[in-house]
Image (cartoon, rainbow, N blue to C red):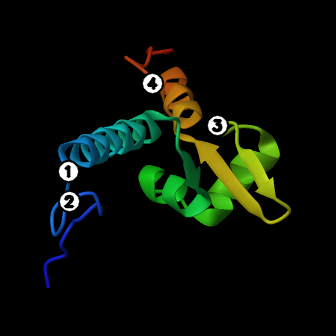
């Protein structure tokens, strides 16, 4: 069932001013949605492990040894990872070549 948009100013229709305000608000919401998508998202521990293809024990070991990316302690039992921190950690670990040490 299609919803009918009326403003109350014009019988059974929407006046130009209300239509303009509605269109402006829709544009603001679209911009806000885009802004939120560009923020630095926090990955769940599962998303982090799936992304890198590692196990829960490996992720836990990285945290305890400090060998993994920085993490966020979201609560007593919940861990998160900023996407930018993981990406930076990966950039720092990127190897161009391995030297022969024979």
Q: Which mark is residue 48?
A: none
Q: Position of residue 83 (x, y in %)?
A: 52, 39
- Name the disc covering residue 15, or none: 1
Q: From mark 2 to mark 1, how far is it between C-alphas?
A: 6 Å
Residue designated by label 3: 69
Q: Residue at x 19, y 57 (%)?
A: 14
Cα separation, mark 3 vs mark 1, equals 55 Å
Label 2 sits on residue: 10
Instruction: Describe the element under mark 3 as helix, strand or loop.
Output: loop
Residue 28's x, y, as percent? 37, 38
Q: Is residue 24 left or right of residue 11?
A: right
Check disc 2: other Cα within 10 Å, few if <14, some if 14-19, many if 20+. few
**Residues at marks 2 and 3, CA–CA distance in whole angstroms:** 59 Å
Q: Where is residue 78 shown, x and y percent of the image?
A: 74, 62
Q: Pointer 4: what residue?
A: 94
Regarding mark 1 in the picture, which secondary structure is present there? loop
Question: Badge 3: few (under 14), some or many (20 or more) residues near its Cα, within 10 Å?
Answer: some
Query: Which residue, as the protein is rendered here, is positioned at the far bottom?
Result: 1
């Amino acid at each position: 069932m299609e919803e009918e948009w009326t403003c109350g100013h014009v019988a059974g229709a929407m006046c130009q001013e209300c239509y303009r305000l509605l269109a402006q608000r829709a544009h603001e919401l679209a911009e806000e949605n885009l802004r939120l998508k560009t923020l630095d998202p926090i990955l769940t521990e599962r998303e982090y492990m799936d992304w890198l293809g590692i196990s829960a024990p490996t992720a836990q070991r990285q945290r305890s040894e400090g060998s993994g990316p920085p993490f966020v302690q979201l609560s007593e039992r919940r861990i998160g990872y900023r996407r930018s921190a993981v990406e930076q950690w990966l950039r720092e670990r990127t190897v161009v070549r391995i030297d022969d040490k024979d």
